[in-house]
Image (cartoon, rainbow, N blue to C red):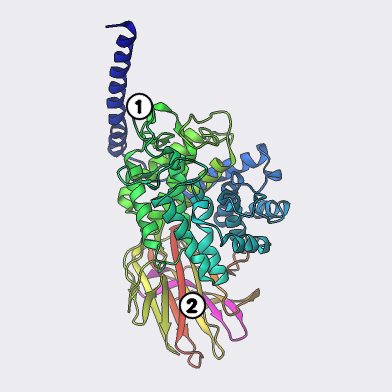
Amino acid sequence: MATSEYFDTMKTVLALLLTVLVVVLPTAQSSQTAQAAPAALPSRSSIVQAARTATDYFYAHNGGATSDAGWKWAPYFMGVEALVQETNDPIYRQWLQSWGARNNWIADAPSSPTSNPDSRAAIQVWQDSANVGVNANLAPSDRFMAGDLSLAANRYWWIDSMFMGLPLWPRWATRTGKSAYQMKHSQFYNFLKNDGTTSVRPGCVADGLFDAAEQLWWRDCKYVGQRDSLGHKVMWARGNGWVIGAMARTLMVLPPADPQYTEYKTMLQTMAARLAQLQGSDGMWRSSLLSPSLFPAPETSATALFVYAMAYGIRTGLLDSATYLPVITRAWAGLSTLSLKSSGFLSNCQGVGEAPAKPSTTTSIAYCVGAFTLAASEVARLSGVLASDTFGRTVTGALGSAELGGSWTAATGFSVVRGVAQLTTPPGTTRAAYLNGVSSQDTEVRTTLNLVRPTTGSAYVAVIGRRVGTASYGARVVVAPSGSVKLQIRRTNSTVVDLIVPRLTYAPGNRLQLRLQVTGASPTAIRAKVWKVGTAEPSTWQVTKTDSTAGLQSVGSIGLMVYSGSNSVPAPLVVSVEELWAGSTR
């Protein structure tokens, strides 16, 4: 045998050996992961603090005050907006205001008349910013979105574009009421899944970018069928992170009745199941999903996007908590210890690319920090969570079972229609629904609701933060025909604090957010606030009370209650509840 032939033969043998080893490696990693006994999630406060540390460090050290509106920065400010919701810290709201104003609220559009989806991601942030009290100018976004209605499906030809663009279309369908917007996201998604060809990548075959055998996505048609040096399919971690993250962000704003809802839900579930198998024993994923040994360092941006989507899936009942909470717990431990340094520097982020590559330990990047903060926001909502319900089901004559928290014990006349709980009560009647499976002493409850403003009488809506037997502590909103809003603290059937909320007038079409905390015992502290969706959450509690009534100084369940005045019009009163979340304040 010639020397050259000998070496060629040896190369082939070595390649085969490496292939065998790497085929086993993900399974071995998954086995280690499955056998490990994960600790519980850390406290919500520590998770949020980790996000603040990373976000603040990057803003100060990487030009946050001069950042543009491009796709690298858009996910970062998605994370900032999530921190506004979690902390109500005015500094983050100011960062959003400054970012938008500095860029004239104009998405980073290319000079051509056709949109690059990457250049539209900022619009997601600006719309969300308006919902947390930022004075955002959405007129330029309206123009961009109207112009983009003419885009051909193949304008989205790489999988990253789903995260940047898909969630915009149901948002603008809701914003404008125009069905044309509602149709676009499915066109783009179906093209990517089933075709994926583009003139940018000559010679591609219209096979689609979703690999059903692997339950993962190719980055674009250039990579379909491509194998790496170990013989495995080139499945890029962050690219798949953008996809599963897009599923979560689109489901967040997509009506459950949308024909595409089931497809996105199923895709999130499918990808989550496959990704859980590929998780490393340290909780992290590698840049190359099927060949982790090619780039063995943990990769932060992909891990964070996977965590973000899976935690959302658990919170909304799309993913089984018993199966995926251990995955999330291990992943967060990796992100918060291996990725996040004590200084706030976020390490192990792969730079801009389109294929697996080595992550950096010396340079971080905006989208990676944003993904980390988004992950933290969803994980924080799982830490100490007692109940969560987005009412993503249809039930007649009852409320069914919450996504987390057990079954609702509900009055006749309650139902769930198109993903919204409808609480109906005739004049002079109180009706309630309880989650008796929840048992907590130190509890926070949040809900979003709306109703038809009465023309006669008043409408009453309450959340119950602690119910023991038939006694309870709660907060109640009272809407009058004038639109004035009262906020009350209630002890069973008695009002113990009563406040007309300053500068809050309820108008048709408005939605209210109500937040209640019931903490401690002997005395118990009760405090609440209410504000209009699209305005800033009040920085302080609007009503507070301490109370030591015997029989209420223990753990209790939570619930919702509605009452209509005896002469109220229209009748019956119908209150729409979009979501309810409850968690421990400890």
**Figure check: 572 above or below 547:** below
The location of residue 56, given as percent across then percent down, is 62, 43
**Figure check: 9 above or below 353:** above
Q: Which of 549 and 303 is in front in this view?
A: 303
Question: What crowding class fits label 2: few (fewer than 14 Cα within 10 Å), some (14-19), or many (20 or more)?
Answer: many
The location of residue 323, given as percent across then percent down, is 30, 49
Disc 1 is placed on an element classified as loop
The kind of secondary structure the magenta stretch mainly shows is strand
Q: Disc 1 residue type?
A: Leu
Tell me how far mark 1 sits from mark 2, CA to CA: 61 Å
Marks 1 and 2, the one that precedes in the sequence: 1
Question: In this rendering, which labeled residue sits more in front, label 1 or label 2?
Answer: 1
Residue 457 visible in rendering = yes
Residue under numbered circle 2: 461
Q: Which mark is residue 203?
A: none
Residue under numbered circle 1: 230
Q: Which of 50 and 525 is in front in this view?
A: 50
Q: Which segment is the magenta one?
A: 466-486
Magenta span has 478? yes
Q: Which of 363 and 410 is in front in this view?
A: 363
Question: Position of 116 compared to 229: left or right?
Answer: right
Question: Position of 356 compared to 56: left or right?
Answer: left
The quadrant of the picture occupied by the N terminus is top left
Question: What crowding class fits label 1: few (fewer than 14 Cα within 10 Å), some (14-19), or many (20 or more)?
Answer: many
Residue 383 visible in rendering = no
The residue furthest bottom is: 567
Question: Position of 52 compared to 389: left or right?
Answer: right
User: Which residue lies at the image location 65% right of the left edge and 63% below the top edge?
Assistant: 143
